[in-house]
Amino acid sequence: MNKHLYISLKALSYLGLMLTLIPAFCVFYDIMDMQQYKNLILAGTLIWLFTAPFWINRKLK
């Protein structure tokens, strides 16, 4: 795997993780409603699941 792809996948994976964490605080502080929360959690989960396996436990050559 080349370096640019590795870094891009890693950044996208962390974006997915942020999409699962930040909306929880927004709902807690009543900044967003539950439907927006569910949509963002689903998007973040899918992004993480489809990008993380390609870079976790891989050696960068």
Image (cartoon, rainbow, N blue to C red):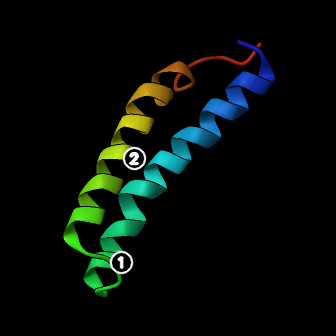
Looking at the picture, how far across and down is residue 3, in whole percent? 79, 23
Residues 29 and 3: in front is 29
Please state, as top left, top right, bottom left or bottom right, where the C terminus lies in the image: top right
The image quadrant that residue 22 belongs to is: bottom left
N-terminal label among 2 and 1: 1
**Residue depicted at 43% across the width and 37% down the height:** 48
Between 55 and 51, the residue placed more toward the observer is 51
Name the residue at 77% across, 15% down: 2
Q: Quadrant of residue 55?
A: top right
Q: Which mark is residue 44?
A: 2
Asked if residue 39 lies left or right of residue 14, the reply is: left
User: Please, what secondary structure does the residue beneath circle 2 have?
Assistant: helix
Give the residue type at disc 1: Cys
Q: Which residue is mark 1?
A: 26
- Judged from this view, the residue extending furthest toward the bottom is 29
Q: CA distance from mark 2 to mark 1?
A: 15 Å
Three-letter code for the amino acid on which mark 2 is drawn: Gly
Image quadrant where one finds the N terminus:
top right
Question: What residue lies at 66% left-to-right and 17% top-to-bottom?
Answer: 59
Residue drawn at 69 percent across, 25 percent down = 6
Rendering coords of residue 29 (x, y %) = 31, 87
Residue at disc 1, secondary structure: helix
- The correct choice, above or below, for 53 with respect to 45 in the image is above
Residue 47 marker:
none
Label 2 Cα crowd, 10 Å radius (few <14 / some 14-19 / many 20+): many
Q: Is residue 26 above or below residue 53?
A: below
Residue 19 is drawn in which quadrant?
bottom left
In the rendered image of this protein, does residue 20 appear above or below residue 59? below
State if disc 1 and disc 2 touch (CB < 8 Å): no
